Image (spheres, rainbow, N blue to C red):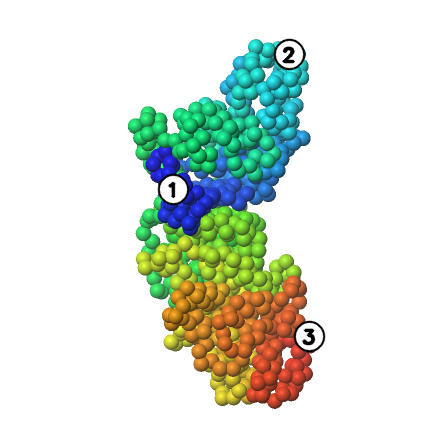
Amino acid sequence: AFMEGRLSEEDLDGFRQEKSREGHALSSYPHPRLMPHFWEFPTVSMGIGPMNAIYQAQNNRYLHNRGLKDTSDQQVWAFLGDGEMDEPESRGLLQLAANENLDNLNFVINCNLQRLDGPVRGNGKIMQELEAFFRGAGWNVIKVVWGREWDDLLTRDTDGSLVKIMNETVDGDYQTYKAESGGFVREHFFGKTPQTKDLVADLTDDQIWNLKRGGHDYRKVYAAYKAATEFKGKPTVILAHTVKGYGLGPHFEGRNATHQMKKLTLDDLKKFRDHLRIPVTDEQLEKDAYRPPYYHPGNDAPEIKYMMERRAALGGSVPERRNTHAEIVLPEAKSYEVAKRGSGKQMAATTMAFVRLLKDLMRDKNFGKHIAPIIPDEARTFGMDAFFPTAKIYNPKGQNYLSVDRDLVLAYKESPAGQLIHPGINEAGAVAAFTAAGTSYATHGIPLVPVYVFYSMFGFQRTGDAFWAAADQMTRGFIIGATAGRTTLTGEGLQHADGHSPLLASTNPAVLTYDPAYGYEIGHIVRAGLERMYGEKSTDKNVMYYLTVYNEPIIQPAEPENLDVDGVIKGIYLLAPAKIDGPRTQILASGVSVPWALEAQRILADDWNVSADVWSVTSWNELRRDGLAAEEEAFLNPGQPARVPFVTQQLEGATGPIVAVTDYMKAVPDQIRQFVPNEFATLGADGFGFSDTRAAARRYFKNDTHSIVVRALEMLARRGEVDVDAPVKAIEKYKLLNVNAGTTGNAGGEA
């Protein structure tokens, strides 16, 4: 980029100084979010690069097969390390590329035989291992092992002695040879047999030292790349044999500590200059050991002219991130009507409310084609099998078998033009598909809106690192935890019961987390999300919306008149004002706990003459972010009128103690405690989940309806606003210590 004139010397001086050299700063790694016009793909976290590349190649074909863009000429390249291939993610998704014949995909694995602390396979041969692994996975394998300087030796190796030594020498020894001298290699490698020793008898030690490995022979590398692009029918992996620290001199090359060596000595720097034949004098280097000069041959140099001509002919620089994209027409208002209507007399969980909304959005004549639903093998659980016969499941090979459920209305149907992406039992692949689709607006100029629907907490808990990379790549889309809550998945138990995903999501600055209670709330949140991602007036588009929805059916109410839509979007609104006058309390609830709060409101009024307002908190996380932002503004502007946090504004005039309740850990609602002046108590589900009835689980965790009642009475009793014995009487009346006495929730479990 410096040679092309895209980066200046001042920019290079700003390496890893992104704030102190703002305007002339370079990020340490390829971070698109930090250099949004330069980098396209972050491959920083080991293992995420390989799987993202696989699903990027699939996404290219997905766009093509759905008729959204001609991508037939595009290639995806992933540059990886042999040590990186020990990450499960690096190898775990190879079958997708083979099964879908992604011959638009190329892995280049730099086999320098070393990881950070030592050899990758000191007692073995990583290139042989990887060749076997990739061949077994159905890939085309190209090996670039030896440079052309070896060709003459191999031609004269008539009895195979040299090849035998090459094959028997383990990687740990190959590493050692490059850390020693040419004489050492002569004695310990070629000296193993008289025949091989004679092969190099007429070579000097320097010539032996300069016998390159294939990955450093640009002719061999070019030949491998050309062969990869011309191969059809399978994905290709190029295994390139190299030396770690190549060109940096004997103190660096092949050393175990190479990764941690940060400084070149003056002598090292001179040797590096000599090796690369850079026309910089000793005097220039000696002038300031800490600031060696940059070298540019000049814009008129034939190399630069050639490079610029080729880049122009090929369509521009690489890498380069382009944010212009085809126009996207957002859904019409009628597409959201299903969310506003409620469910009438039919019970429906918020998962089903979301799925019904998604179905109508996909039917929108202008917008629907942009949606890319991603479901890892739980579509029927979520009631999304209704999409099978119409939207169909993406499979580039179609459906070449007789489906066992072909006679059913909701039969499983695969198609090359299918809209649903079905990664199987594969959350890592699902996030990779989500990232590829959610960045299509930049990668391809064709916006896709991925909607990744996963089971309970197997999104953020299982693949949080991949979501971090998605944020770096500025992915846009919706993430749906479709069976949320710690007590709602009562049959599933410890590793399914989600009590913490909102906290995990809160660590990702690009994720907006919502815990809606009703379908109409979901409608407004989704509309706001789409407008933020692709609306003309939006200034911060690169976000992901995480919605937690539940599998517990309730009567979904129709949207109330004069709904506080702003409150829904920003995180809190008054759902049900108190119906009587009496000692006052406030109940803040989110998601599945809102009906418990409404029932507690009724019991407090009927049994204790206590007046309770019920608030629906659609986003504890967003309320906290707003509160922290207000504090930061006040901190940096002393003496100026401080902005009041939104949650504080909403609760202004709401008197009495607050009981905050969710089906999550107490830490989730506790996020807003500092912004609320009222006395504040939190009910939640801390600890591990377990299998039981919903009513028993909620009674055990003490976040059920009667726990809300008792907690409110305790705070009012301390204030002298109800009888001091009321809490004890309530505990006895409702048998609060008996898990079998719980009544909160129902037994329904369908989406």
x then y, percent, for residue 47: 55, 43
Residue 636 drawn at (x, y percent): 41, 64
Q: Mark 3 or 2, which is nearer the eye?
A: 2
Is 671 situated above or below 294? below
Q: Nearer the viewer, residue 242 or 329?
A: 242
Q: Nearer the viewer, mark 2 or mark 1?
A: 1
Q: Which mark is residue 478?
A: none
Give the residue drawn at x 59%, y 38%. Answer: 116
Q: Is residue 70 left or right of residue 592?
A: left
Q: Which mark is residue 11?
A: 1
Looking at the picture, which amino acid does disc 3 mark?
A: Asn
If the image is split into quadrants, where does the N terminus sit?
A: top left
The residue singled out by tag 2 in the image is 195
Secondary structure under tag 2 reads helix
Q: Tell me if I can see residue 590 in this picture.
A: no
Q: Position of residue 586 (x, y in %)?
A: 51, 79
Residue reaching furthest to the left: 300
Q: CA distance from mark 2 to mark 1?
A: 54 Å
302 w.r.t. 728: above or below: above
Q: Is the residue marked by circle 1 packed among few (<14), some (14-19), or many (20+) residues within 10 Å?
A: some
Q: Which of marks 3 and 1 precedes in the sequence?
A: 1
Q: CA distance from mark 1 to mark 3?
A: 67 Å
The mark closer to the camera, 1 or 3, is 1
What SS does tag 1 mark? helix
Residue 479 drawn at (x, y percent): 48, 57
In the rendered view, tell whether residue 292 sits above or below residue 724.
above
Q: Nearer the viewer, residue 378 or 113?
A: 113
Q: Which mark is residue 740?
A: 3
* Amino acid on which disc 1 is placed: Asp
Marks 1 and 3 in Cβ contact (< 8 Å):
no
* Residue ID at (37%, 41%): 10
